Image (cartoon, coloured by chain):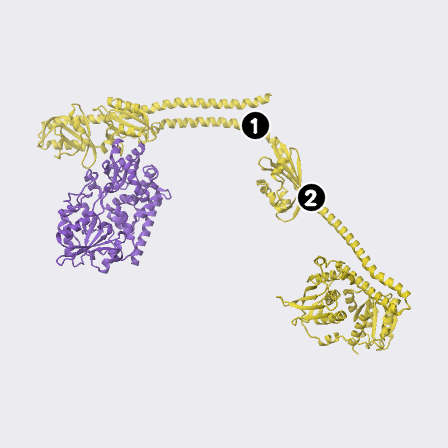
Chain colours: A purple, B yellow
């Protein structure tokens, strides 16, 4: 989810020349070896497991990798420009199947359905890399997290309470927690960009037709009762004190102190957050937390959001296309990916993945996660969706500057403006 | 005294009644509250007792079902399918969700369909470990749904190879909750089946499954202390019923618990206190409302009675008060006095007479809002009466002020005398303002004062005038009389005679000049002077000034320069004589007060201006004479003012010339300025505007006729007809003309003159000198008759007026009567010669 937070600025970044901002690492030349060009975001390419797989590939095959790393916020534009200009790049990294509208996917990339390693992909990972027609667009090779409602199990047990399985139970849980004096949910209003997505994902993931109508302009958010249900629930939850008292001044950096101190009992986050962001030394550690679905009044049984996975896509116009496909096969080899992801906290992308560290929080309720997990849909599939705009709209609602209906109307209006802006940007380019 | 006691007794009695009613009401409410609360809790216990019994019956029915099925299964062949058919039939009838064969030994289970490990719970195995029945246990299905199991020890056996020692049916908690749900209490009650340790087996409320252990939750969320919690825990351990009140999350709740009767389960009901007492609250509210209404009605009746009584009592006095107020309004409307009463504490206006709008122009309502609005009307914005002055007025005392007010609508200013009284009305301090119009009285006083001042001033002026005149007239008269006496004594000495005669002549001229100026000044100041606007030639005036004044300057060997702006128009419309008088005054003064060998400059320039219908001229007379002090310059235009110094004392002057000049300039709408320094000289600047004539023809002949070259032989041999009633004057004139070679025929009045002229042959007389004021026929009438008599010379014989009437109006009258010139008395021979020559040379023969 953190990556998703960074995704929007990247998509909106202005055009910059790749050469002016990128850094090229050229492998030593070898007359018998093949040199493949890989382009990706700087921070993505610096991940330990990526560095490991690149080194392993070069060492074991004798081939070389020409790594083109681009500043994160300029990558989308730079990659699109590079494809458009025909500058040869063999492999592109891209965040799953979200917002590929700027690339001519069919004209530029290989479909990978028939690759030998496809059967080794977990269903969840494969889903993230497949387009609407069922074409596998890339090899998922990334740390995979599960987003949901993470709660302080130790605290809940001490209060004689249990996790919820339905919306009614979740509301009851919040009510019961409020009665004990605890803040049920940490709602970082200043940066809550990802939270409304949890509510919107099941609406559109479960109803593709509705998504199509929304994107086609046949309907708006205002025509979808569940969108209003979401807004109503957020408004009611705030009114009932479920977000505590100073949620409007709460941001990303406040989540960790709140959760580690017991100041809040639950929050909507992802499992890897507990490995990367939960501060040490607090009263509670990651072992005190457990996972249940997110309930925001749009799906009774709750929902989980699957990981946001980077995938490797092969340029079908490259004269080294086969070498690039071979590189993907190298990465999808169990020995290689287990070596790369050794000790990395992630949900498995491959069925044979054994060396990664899987969170107990997820594995404890894995059947439920698999049953209720939805692909991240709102941010990636709704045309004109802006996480930042959602923060503004929700905060207008929470600040009582608008009511529930007004909030939904604002969602529509912001989405209309965002769509027009994107269209304008693309027209200019 | 009796009346006063009555006044105290009634309120006390009313208070006592009110207190009694309140106390009785509270006691009643307390009693009713307890009764209704007890009824409510009884009702709560009864309802949940019924629920408990229903749940017990439900459990008992399931136990009976399981026992009969156990018997049937034991008697049946497990492989025949009859068992599964029987169980499925019962499932449809009893609506249980699953049937289980249980092995307490292996802690495993099998469904009738053959599935194993279909639920997870330790509850069931713990229950089966005990010999008691029936067994109720909780479990969770693989899909996350919570279930409740009803189990019995069985005969034992095998079902499809699974060795079992107990059987069970399960219901999903969602289905089972319906049997525990209570519609009473507005659906806000919560019902749980719990273990004695507080663990929740089953919740009847949607979402209630999030409660894991209610005892633990109560510890965290309620305000129960250890003793209260210990009592509940003890009751639950002992399977005892109980009812507790506590706050959960700040809301008062009733907690009711009863043993289910199976194993150690308890039925726990949690209901908000407000819901339990809803009925009570309703009755209480209704009762309170009824009593409140009754109390209010009684109170209202009493108050109404008191009010009506008070109203009736005050009605009469109010009516009288209104009458008085109305009468006062009417009265104040008919006078010009304003009445205002304000409260001494806050200066709020209690009363203001309605005539304030008529007299000051401010509506009554505006003054009522804020009396300070009156300050707006006071001239110079003065405070009507400052607050600190008001507070200093002693009680029953008053102060007086006079203020001038401006009417806000008409702008009219009026004076008011304001009397402010400080009074106490019913022990409330008031200020009463009475504003009386004193405008007429004040105006009258002012007029009287002005008249008095004017009279004083006039008297003073008259005294000054007489004093001045006495001095100024006596001085030349003294010389005339004195030298006349000396002349008589020294008649034999021709030298002395000439000297005395010259001095007498000089004094006579001075006296004449004084008299002319005084009369002129008098006429100007009396406002009788008017301008005679006619077309005239500026060049002609300038030439004449040169002719008249240049000789005087030459006598003192002064340089006399005339500078004319070449662009200056020749013909103008204006009063030629007055302009001439102004310029002669300035130029003759310049010559007079400039020593010998001095210089006098006379400059005429046109001042640029935007209009084309008139011309603005600047006349500057500058000399390098004796000049004037700054002190004298301040009073130079004041009549009879002359600077006193060694030089001026030797120069004769009336002290009226500049005053006359200034008045004439003012009369002509111009300005006069003077700059001077003693010993350096003076410069007088006069700026005057003149209308331009419709046409400016150049009349060369006329100009030529004004060119005057004196010819000493011109008068010799001429015959004049002189009409003069004063014998002395006629003798002087005759002698003077005879000295110039002129012969004269005398007529003693106008009629005689007319007859003599009519009877004369044509060309007999060269000129007629006509006195104006004469007996029988005055000069004007005589002239008109001469002009109309038909004599051949009647039309063009020159006739000149000889009169002491020397004003411009007199000259104008003479001209209108048909005369051709004007000579002022006493006759100046030089003026006579000039005029005669001018008239004679212009006469067409």
Q: Could you say which quadrant of the image residue B766 lies in? A: bottom right
Residue carrying label 1 = B309
First in sequence: mark 2 vs mark 1: 1
Viewer-side label of 2, 1: 2
Q: Position of residue B309 (x, y in %)?
A: 57, 27
Q: Is residue A269 above or below residue B836?
A: above
Q: Are discs 2 and 1 located on one and the same chain? A: yes
Task: Pick the residue in front: B425 or B544.
Answer: B544
| Disc 2 to disc 1: CB gap under 8 Å | no
In the rendered structure, the answer to whether residue B266 lies left or right of residue B277 reads left
Residue A122: % across, % down: 17, 45
- The answer to which of B182 and A378 lies nearer the viewer is A378
- The C terminus of chain B sits in image quarter: bottom right
Label 1 sits on a secondary structure element that is: helix
Residue tagged by mark 2?
B438
For the N terminus of chain B, give its image quadrant.
Answer: top right
């Amino acid at each position: 989810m953190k990556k998703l937070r960074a995704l929007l600025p990247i998509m909106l970044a202005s055009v910059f020349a790749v050469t002016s901002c990128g850094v090229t690492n050229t492998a030593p030349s070898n007359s018998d070896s093949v040199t493949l060009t890989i382009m990706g975001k700087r921070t993505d390419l610096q991940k330990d497991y990526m560095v490991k797989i690149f080194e392993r590939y070069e060492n074991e095959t004798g081939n070389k990798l020409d790594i083109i790393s681009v500043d994160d916020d300029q990558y989308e534009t730079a990659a699109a420009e590079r494809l458009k200009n025909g500058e040869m790049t063999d492999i592109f990294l891209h965040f799953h199947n979200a917002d590929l509208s700027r690339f001519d996917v069919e004209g530029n990339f290989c479909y990978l359905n028939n690759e030998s390693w496809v059967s080794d992909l977990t269903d969840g990972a494969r889903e993230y890399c497949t387009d609407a027609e069922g074409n596998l667009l890339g090899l998922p090779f990334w740390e995979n997290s599960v987003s949901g409602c993470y709660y302080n199990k130790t605290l809940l047990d001490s209060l004689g309470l249990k996790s919820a399985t339905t919306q009614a139970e979740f509301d009851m849980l919040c009510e019961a927690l409020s009665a004990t004096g605890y803040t049920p949910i940490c709602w970082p209003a200043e940066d809550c960009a990802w939270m409304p997505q949890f509510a919107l994902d099941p609406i559109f993931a479960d109803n593709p037709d509705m998504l199509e109508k929304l994107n086609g302009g046949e309907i708006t958010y205002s025509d979808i009762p569940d969108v209003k249900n979401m807004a109503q629930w957020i408004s009611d939850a705030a009114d009932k004190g479920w977000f505590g008292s100073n949620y409007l001044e709460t941001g990303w950096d406040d989540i960790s102190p709140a959760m580690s101190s017991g100041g809040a009992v639950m929050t909507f986050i992802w499992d890897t957050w507990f490995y990367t962001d939960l501060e040490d030394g607090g009263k509670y550690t990651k072992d005190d937390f457990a996972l249940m679905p997110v309930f925001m009044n749009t799906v009774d049984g709750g929902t989980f959001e699957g990981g946001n996975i980077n995938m490797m896509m092969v340029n079908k116009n490259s004269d080294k296309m086969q070498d690039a496909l071979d590189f993907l096969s190298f990465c999808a080899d169990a020995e290689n990916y287990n070596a790369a992801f050794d000790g990395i906290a992630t949900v498995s992308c491959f069925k044979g993945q054994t060396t990664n560290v899987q969170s107990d929080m997820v594995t404890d309720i894995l059947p439920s996660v698999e049953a209720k997990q939805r692909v991240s849909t709102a941010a990636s599939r709704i045309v004109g969706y802006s996480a930042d705009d959602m923060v503004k709209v929700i905060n207008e609602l929470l600040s009582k500057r608008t009511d529930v209906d007004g909030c939904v109307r604002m969602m529509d209006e912001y989405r209309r403006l965002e769509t027009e802006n994107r269209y304008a940007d693309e027209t200019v380019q | 005294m009796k009346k006063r006691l009555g006044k105290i007794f009634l309120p006390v009695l009313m208070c006592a009644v009110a207190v009694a009613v309140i106390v009785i009401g509270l006691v009643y409410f307390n009693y009713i509250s307890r009764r209704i609360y007890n009824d409510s809790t009884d009702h709560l216990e009864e309802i949940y007792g019924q629920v408990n019994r229903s749940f017990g019956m439900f459990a008992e029915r399931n136990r009976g079902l399981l026992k009969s099925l156990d018997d049937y299964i034991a008697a049946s062949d497990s492989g025949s399918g009859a068992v599964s058919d029987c169980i499925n039939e019962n499932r449809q009838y009893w609506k249980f969700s699953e049937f289980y064969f249980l092995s307490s030994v292996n802690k495993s289970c099998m469904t009738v369909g053959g599935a194993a490990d279909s639920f997870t719970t330790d509850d069931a195995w713990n229950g089966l470990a005990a010999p008691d029945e029936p067994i109720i246990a909780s479990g969770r299905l693989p899909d996350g749904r919570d279930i409740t199991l009803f189990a019995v020890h069985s005969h034992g056996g095998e079902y499809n190879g699974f060795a079992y020692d107990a059987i069970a049916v399960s219901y999903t908690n969602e289905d089972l909750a319906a049997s525990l749900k209570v519609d009473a209490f507005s659906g806000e009650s919560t019902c749980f089946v719990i273990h004695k340790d507080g663990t929740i087996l089953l919740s009847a409320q949607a979402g209630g499954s999030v409660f894991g252990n209610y005892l633990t939750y109560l510890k965290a969320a309620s305000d129960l202390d250890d003793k209260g919690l210990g009592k509940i825990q003890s009751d639950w351990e002992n399977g005892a019923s109980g009812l507790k009140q506590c706050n959960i999350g700040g809301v008062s709740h009733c907690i009711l618990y009863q043993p289910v009767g199976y194993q150690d389960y308890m039925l726990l009901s949690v209901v908000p206190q407000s819901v339990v007492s809803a009925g009570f609250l309703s009755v209480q509210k209704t009762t309170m409302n009824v009593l409140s209404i009754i109390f209010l009605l009684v109170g209202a009746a009493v108050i109404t009675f008191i009010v009506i009584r008070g109203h009736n009592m005050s009605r009469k006095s109010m009516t009288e008060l209104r009458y008085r107020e109305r009468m006062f309004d009417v009265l104040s409307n008919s006078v010009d006095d304003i009445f205002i009463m304000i409260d001494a504490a806050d200066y709020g206006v209690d009363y203001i007479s309605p005539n304030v709008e008529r007299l000051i122009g401010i509506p009554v309502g505006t003054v009522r809002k804020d009396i300070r609005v009156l300050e707006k009307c006071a001239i110079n914005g003065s405070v009507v009466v400052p607050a600190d002055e008001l507070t200093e007025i002693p009680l029953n005392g008053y102060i007086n002020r006079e203020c001038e007010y401006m009417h806000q609508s008409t702008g009219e200013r009026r004076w008011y005398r304001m009397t402010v009284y400080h009074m106490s009305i019913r022990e409330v301090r008031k200020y009463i303002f009475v504003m009386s119009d004193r405008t007429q009285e004040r105006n009258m006083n002012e007029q009287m004062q002005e008249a008095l001042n004017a009279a004083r001033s006039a008297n003073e002026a008259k005294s000054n005038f007489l004093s001045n005149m006495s001095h100024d007239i006596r001085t030349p008269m003294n010389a005339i009389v004195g030298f006349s006496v000396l002349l008589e004594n020294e008649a034999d000495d021709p030298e002395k005679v000439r000297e005395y005669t010259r001095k007498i002549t000089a004094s006579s001229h001075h006296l004449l000049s004084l008299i002319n100026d005084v009369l002129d000044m008098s006429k100007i100041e009396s406002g009788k002077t008017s301008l005679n606007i006619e077309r005239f030639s500026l060049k002609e005036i300038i030439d004449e000034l040169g002719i008249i004044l240049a000789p005087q300057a030459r006598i003192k060997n002064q340089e006399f320069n005339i500078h004319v702006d070449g662009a200056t128009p020749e013909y103008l419309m204006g009063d030629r004589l007055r302009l001439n008088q102004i310029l002669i005054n300035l130029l003759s003064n310049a010559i007079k007060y400039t020593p010998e060998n001095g210089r006098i400059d006379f400059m005429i320039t046109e001042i640029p201006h935007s209009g084309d219908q008139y011309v603005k001229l600047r006349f500057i007379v500058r000399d390098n004479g004796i000049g004037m002090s700054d002190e004298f310059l301040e009073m130079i235009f004041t009549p009879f003012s002359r600077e006193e110094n060694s030089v001026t004392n030797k120069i004769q002057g009336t002290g009226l010339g500049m005053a006359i000049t200034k008045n004439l300039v003012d009369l002509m709408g111009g300005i006069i300025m003077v700059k001077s320094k003693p010993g350096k000289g003076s410069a007088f600047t006069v700026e005057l505007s003149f209308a331009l004539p419709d046409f400016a023809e150049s009349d060369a002949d006329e100009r030529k006729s004004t060119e005057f070259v004196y010819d000493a032989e011109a008068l010799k041999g001429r015959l004049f007809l002189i009409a003069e009633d004063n014998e002395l004057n006629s003798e002087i004139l005759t002698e003077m003309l005879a000295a110039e070679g002129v012969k004269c025929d005398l007529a003693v009045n106008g009629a005689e003159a007319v007859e003599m002229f009519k009877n004369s042959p044509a060309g007999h007389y060269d000129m007629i000198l006509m006195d104006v004021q004469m007996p029988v026929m005055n000069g004007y009438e005589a002239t008109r008759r001469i002009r109309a008599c038909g004599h051949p010379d009647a039309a063009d014989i020159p006739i000149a007026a000889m009169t002491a009437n020397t004003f411009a109006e007199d000259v104008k009258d003479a001209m209108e009567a048909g005369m051709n010139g004007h000579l002022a008395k006493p006759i100046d021979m030089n003026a006579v010669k000039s005029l005669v020559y001018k008239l004679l040379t212009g006469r067409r023969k």
